[in-house]
Image (cartoon, coloured by chain):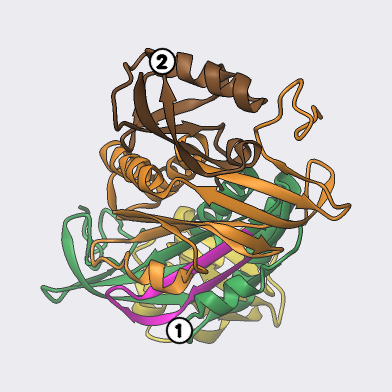
Chain colours: A yellow, B green, C orange, D brown
């Protein structure tokens, strides 16, 4: 089990009801973690439509989870 | 070369003044304004949310790319967050260059890449009372019905 | 839709404010600034002369053409005449549209056509003391030696 | 002979030394008039590089001269 910090933005934040939380998980990578969270919180966005950031930088979904990581789940952007 | 996220109203005149350069013959500015309708629906307000740390980092990368690709003397951009009303300024991009070709192309590049890559989200509030996060529609998502 | 020749300094903020339109989501502004060198020569000042009656007529035709070609909500332009110093604003073109494609294209069209067609002339004064009317060089003309 | 009003701009104005004048001419069209004026005032710009305006509107060089016309001789432009 690892313990990571997860931030939610926009639609994900609203569907989760909080903007960030600590999560304990047995998922080995970020893709698995999102699948878990999606089922638990009924997120409507499929993982393929999200991007991931780890510790303030874009990262690949295959990244191995480690204690204390800051993960950010990034819905499709729409600036401007 | 600066890219910022701001929860306060933007100051276009002050932003432009910072582009001044004796070698500059052309300045192109893009402003994104909140308009009253989008895809046929009447918009009453917009809400922008950002992941500021990463947005500013990615925005600065875009400005650097523009500097590599075009003959720029200066470029900066600021994007609002928070609730905005009709006509409000949501995003400002300004570029200075010796010649206008580079200024137009760089300004266009920066706003296009910003819209595509920078972690900023827009929620539209409609006159009839609904709201939705733009680009977050899913086939099954009830909050974002297909259009 | 207005095109003006002005012997007084321009007011970019006031000009832009007149483009406000609740249907507008994009505003693109081009500014031409006096730069310190041109084709390798150090410029100390510029002098613009116009044939105001015809310049404003031709300028308005350009704005009308832009309106026909692109989905514009508003457009205006002002060009300075008289003596200008380094960094001074020589020409301002502003365009408002629902979307940025049209705004960028129309702004570019207007400044390109203005430079090509509107009866305005530019005399460059150089640091070393000479001066010349731009585009008026002739093979035999002593005032405008070939470069 | 017709009597027309001629305006000079930029380089032409400087070479002529005045910005406008009344001209009496036996030239039958504007092209001939410019050739006359060019010889008289040693204008360096050939006629092919000028445009013409008559009474405040662009016009063709073949226009027939008439008493009281306002002609403007327009050097290559350079706005912006």
Q: Position of residue D55 (x, y in %)?
A: 31, 35
Question: Along the horizontal axis of the image, is B134 left or right of C108?
Answer: left
Q: Is residue B40 above or below residue A26?
A: above
Q: Is residue C102 above or below residue A12?
A: above
Residues indicated by labels 2 and 1 sit on the same polypeptide chain: no
Q: Residue at x 31, y 31 (%)?
A: D69
Specify the segment rendered in magenta: B75-95
- Identify residue for label 1: B9
- Identify residue for label 2: D26
Any part of residue A62 in sight = no
Q: Would you say the magenta stretch is mainly helix, strand or loop?
A: strand
Q: Secondary structure at mark 1?
A: loop
Q: Position of residue A17 (x, y in %)?
A: 37, 85
Q: Is residue B102 above or below residue D63?
A: below
**Alpha-carbon neighbours of circle 1 within 10 Å: few (<14), some, or many (≥20)?**
some
Q: Residue at x 63, y 77 (%)?
A: B53
Q: Position of residue C25 (x, y in %)?
A: 33, 61
Q: Position of residue D64 (x, y in %)?
A: 31, 16
Q: Nearer the viewer, residue A62 or C84?
A: C84
- Mark 1 belongs to which subunit? B
Residue most extreme to the left:
B128
Question: Along the horizontal axis of the image, is D71 left or right of B146?
Answer: right
Disc 2 and disc 1: Cα gap in Å? Answer: 67 Å
Q: Residue at x 31, y 37 (%)?
A: C65
Give the label, 2 or 1, closer to the camera: 2
């Amino acid at each position: 089990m690892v313990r990571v910090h997860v931030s939610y933005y926009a639609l994900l934040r609203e569907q989760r009801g909080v903007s960030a939380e600590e999560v304990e998980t047995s998922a080995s990578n970020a893709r698995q973690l999102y699948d878990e969270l999606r089922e638990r919180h009924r997120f409507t966005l499929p993982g393929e439509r999200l991007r991931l950031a780890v510790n303030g930088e874009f990262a690949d979904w295959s990244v191995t989870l480690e204690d204390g990581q800051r993960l950010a789940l990034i819905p499709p952007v729409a600036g401007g | 070369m600066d890219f910022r996220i701001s929860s306060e109203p933007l100051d276009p005149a002050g932003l432009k003044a910072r582009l001044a350069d004796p070698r500059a013959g052309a300045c192109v500015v893009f402003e994104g304004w909140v308009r009253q309708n989008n895809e046929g629906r009447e918009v009453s307000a917009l809400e922008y949310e950002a992941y500021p740390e990463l947005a500013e980092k990615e925005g600065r990368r875009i400005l650097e790319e523009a500097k590599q690709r075009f003959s720029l003397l200066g470029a900066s951009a600021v994007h609002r967050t928070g609730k905005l009303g009709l006509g409000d300024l949501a995003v400002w991009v300004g570029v200075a260059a010796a010649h206008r070709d580079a200024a137009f192309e760089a300004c266009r590049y920066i706003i296009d890449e910003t819209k595509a890559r920078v972690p900023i989200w827009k929620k539209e509030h409609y006159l009839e009372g609904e709201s939705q996060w733009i680009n977050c529609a899913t086939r099954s998502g009830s909050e974002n019905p297909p259009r």
